[in-house]
Image (spheres, grey):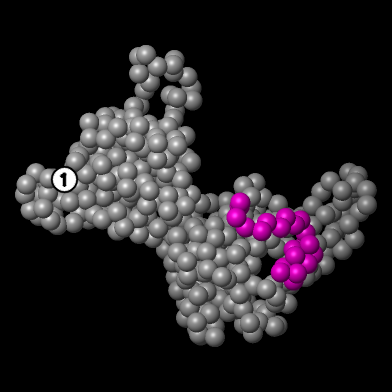
Amino acid sequence: MKIALGVTGGVAAYKAAELVRRLQHEKLDVEVVLTRAAGEFITPLTFAAITGKKVITEMFAAANAAPANVESAIEHIAVAQRIDLLLVAPATTDIIGKFAHGIADDFLSTLYLATKAPVIVAPAMNVNMWEHRATQENVATLRSRGVHVVDPDEGYLACGMTGAGRLAATETIARKVCEVLGLRSDLAGQAVLITAGPTREDLDPVRFLTNRSSGKMGYALAEAAMRRGAQVTLVSGPTELDTPESAEWIPVRSAAEMRRAVLDHSAAANIVIMSAAVSDYRPAAPSATKLKRGSERVTLELEPTPDILAELGRDNRNRVLIGFAAETDRVAENARAKLARKGADMIVANDVTQEGAGFDTDTNIVTLFLRDGREVALGKLSKLEVAHRILDHALLLQQKR
């Protein structure tokens, strides 16, 4: 996973070098952004040597550097899009104020506004600066916007005063990074089988029946499970998503192909999550040649596809089985019926007509329906956050067995 570490101008800047090493210990790919003031306390060469990467120090190339080009002109956008998290440590009161008020006058403040990745700030400053009303209001503003704040420690400060303002311990900051990224080991040693994406049922050699699933929810589940130490098998219908590097990826096309792949791997799985949007019907007699256009009406006969979830549910003693229900009406009623009918331990249901919960979005709004009658409604979250909540409940179900 990729992290941008912003280092701002304060005495605690030297501790950022140690922090980089600690984050690398978690197998995180760290890229450093150094503000001009931070360069007065620690040199870019230090971070370049530790990370093996270019250290970004300026928004624009120096006068004696290579001529600017399109790539260098929008570098902050490229960094913003490739990182999984932005961490600023130490964060001065100056950068906190810029973040809070949307000021973008250097690379780091511009990166903050350009990225959609989670943000963590670890403040470090004089105790009076930390306790000043302006600083506290700015910190409160950032918290309200979802920025994670690692509060400074109390103790003897470089200025000679004693109080809150010392950069939090490296271990504390690293632990917060892992928490926000969902890096845990609670699924270590477990095999998780996940299905994702749509299936395609051929009508003829050039046409097929499918649905609007993008596969994003299933791929988010795979990412979350891998971050938590699981051995992941991802059975995926056709999508436009990047193949996950650390999972066993099994591409399939039709419901029949997905069934074969799932049955081949389900026996070894501790948790099975059927998030794919499997076609319910397929053409009963697909044509071997392209169907030609004519003036008469054509009737298409459909037959049911294999019910993979129900087949797994008939023998579900040794694993946790989770299904999905994408609904357009009577969500709770349909989800409860599906839970009883399929023999699953949990159904994750959503109303795909709801804004932020439909197909091909980066967010989801779901309710978890469990066998014991509980219903857990989740607000609008990123699909990765939804994935972690689902896995949390999967582990709870496992413990009850």
Residue positioned most to the left = 161
Q: Left or right? Give the position of 294 relative to 199.
A: right
Q: Is residue 189 among what the camera can see?
A: yes
Q: Residue at x 82, y 64 (%)?
A: 302
Viewer-proximal residue among 329 and 236: 236
x and y, in percent, of residue 238 in the image: 70, 52
Horizontal and vertical percent position of residue 50 = 40, 40
Q: Is residue 322 above or below residue 98?
A: below
Is residue 364 among the parts visible in the rendering? no
Which contiguous range is marked in magenta?
Answer: 244-265
Viewer-nearest residue: 363 or 235: 235
Q: Nearer the viewer, residue 20 or 368?
A: 20
Q: Residue at x 87, y 63 (%)?
A: 284
Q: State the residue at coordinates (26%, 50%).
A: 122
Image quadrant assignment for residue 211: bottom right
Q: Is residue 353 left or right of residue 5?
A: right
Q: Compared to 107, does 69 lie above or below? A: above
- Where is residue 63, by image quadrant? top left
The magenta stretch spans residue 245: yes
Label 1, on which residue? 125
Instruction: Name the quadrant containing residue 311.
Output: bottom right
The amino acid type found where label 1 is placed reads Met
